[in-house]
Image (cartoon, rainbow, N blue to C red):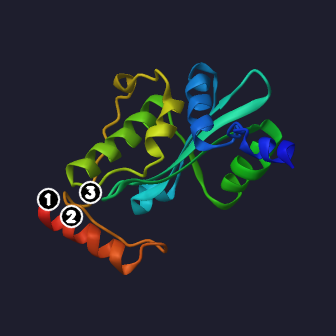
Amino acid sequence: LERRRAKKRVKRPRPASSHGGISSRLEAAADAPILHCCTTAELWQQGIGSVLLSRGLSNGHVAFAVFLVDMYCLGVKDVFMNVAPRAKYDRDLYGKLAGRETLNTLNPECARKLVEGAVQYASELGIPPHPDYRKAKGIFGTIPVQACREEFTYGKDGKPFFVAGPHDGPARCDQILRTLESHC
């Protein structure tokens, strides 16, 4: 019984798949060659869509981050990041995304400028990015934003334009509208 209790008291290490481990692995992968950098076409049509940046690692894995960007109001609304074997990445992420969405290739410099610009625009409105954004932005590494010559416009017709998503409840919508009213 004493041995069993002692085993339970031993602090077990956190699994490598936790977000803390993922963010450090993304930062470590920041110098790896870029595999995919693209956006979904709906980003340009509806003001909200995904931006994917992935890097191929020497061990056959892929480090990636997908940012759900709302160019009209909320900035980075959601983030999904991971490091996965190439076959799993191709099948479960890139393959499914390309199968259901039209993907537009984007220069990595412009992807970074687009995402960071959306975060800055939302921050000026008093809306912080998704909590995992700070962890996921490590995937950009040293990609120079200055190399992108494209200019991106945030807001719709010069104003913030909030559209509630399927997971935005009444309390969240009220909070966003109050924040916009106080900052605009």
Query: Which residue is label 2 attached to?
Result: 179
Amino acid residing under circle 1 = His
x and y, in percent, of residue 53 in the image:
57, 37
What residue lies at 87% left-to-right and 49% top-to-bottom?
1
Distance from label 1 to label 3 (Cα)? 14 Å
Q: Is residue 118 left or right of residue 100?
A: left
Q: Nearer the viewer, mark 1 or mark 3?
A: 1
In the figure, 20 relative to 123: above or below? above
x and y, in percent, of residue 84 in the image:
74, 39
Amino acid residing under circle 3 = Gly
Residue contact between numbered discs 1 and 3, judged by CB atoms under 8 Å: no
Q: Is residue 136 left or right of residue 22?
A: left
Distance from label 2 to label 3 (Cα)? 15 Å
Q: Nearer the viewer, mark 2 or mark 3?
A: 2
What residue lies at 30% left-to-right and 68% top-to-bottom?
162
For marks 1 and 3 on the same chain, the one whose residue lies earlier in the sequence: 3
- Quadrant where the C terminus sits is bottom left
Instruction: Please rate how many residues cluster around mark 1, counting C-alpha atoms within 10 Å: few if below 14, some from 14 to 19, many from 20.
Output: few
Query: Which residue is label 3 attached to?
Result: 155
Res. 72 mark: none
Query: Which residue is label 1 attached to?
Result: 183
For marks 2 and 3 on the same chain, the one whose residue lies earlier in the sequence: 3
x and y, in percent, of residue 73 in the image:
30, 59
Kind of element beneath mark 1: helix
Q: Nearer the viewer, residue 23 or 106?
A: 23
What residue lies at 15% left-to-right and 67% top-to-bottom?
181
Residue contact between numbered discs 2 and 3, judged by CB atoms under 8 Å: no
Amino acid residing under circle 2 = Thr
Q: Nearer the viewer, residue 26 or 91?
A: 26
Kind of element beneath mark 3: loop
Q: Is residue 23 left or right of residue 117?
A: right
